[in-house]
Amino acid sequence: MHSTENGSKDCNRLFGLTHNKVTGSVELAPDYPGCPYCGSKQFYICSCGKIVCYHGERVATCPTCGQRGELTEVSEINLKGGGY
């Protein structure tokens, strides 16, 4: 096996993966214990991209960016990786 400092970038080029984006649904494992801080097993994704624990509120304020809005349920989300 060949290993380099930029292994992820090399693999992406090798397999033609130029975008770090996945679209689909997310299901938590049945044994997922929830957030280690509040215990919530539900979350929402703010338009700023941060994942925030959900506690049943209809209108929420993101603790990271301060945006406030009505939450809606979706069946698919876009996930984007990075930092390589």
Image (cartoon, rainbow, N blue to C red):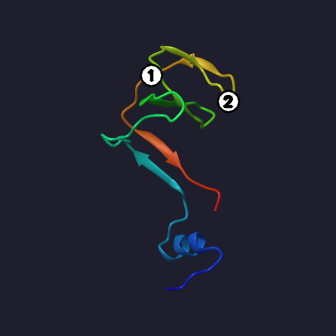
The residue lying furthest to the right in this view is 65
The residue lying furthest to the top in this view is 58
Q: Earlier in the sequence, mark 1 or mark 2?
A: 2
Counting from the top left corner in percent of width and height, residue 48 is at 63, 34
**Mark whose residue sits in front, 1 or 2:** 2
Q: Secondary structure at mark 2?
A: loop
- Seen at 56% across and 17% down, the residue is 60
Q: Which mark is residue 12?
A: none
Counting from the top left corner in percent of width and height, residue 13 is at 55, 74
Counting from the top left corner in percent of width and height, residue 22 is at 46, 51
The residue lying furthest to the bottom in this view is 1
- Residue type for callout 2: Thr
Badges 1 and 2: C-beta atoms under 8 Å apart?
no
Q: Which residue is mark 1?
A: 72
Q: Which residue is mark 2?
A: 64
- Residue type for callout 1: Thr
Residue toward you, 35 or 12: 35
Residue toward you, 30 or 27: 30
- Seen at 48% across and 15% down, the residue is 57
Residue toward you, 18 or 44: 44
| Residue 8 sits above or below residue 46 on the image | below
| The quadrant where residue 41 appears | top left
- Seen at 44% across and 17% down, the residue is 56
| Residue 57 sits above or below residue 53 on the image | above
Check disc 1: other Cα within 10 Å, few if <14, some if 14-19, many if 20+.
few
Q: Secondary structure at mark 1?
A: loop
- Seen at 49% across and 20% down, the residue is 71
Q: CA distance from mark 1 to mark 2?
A: 19 Å
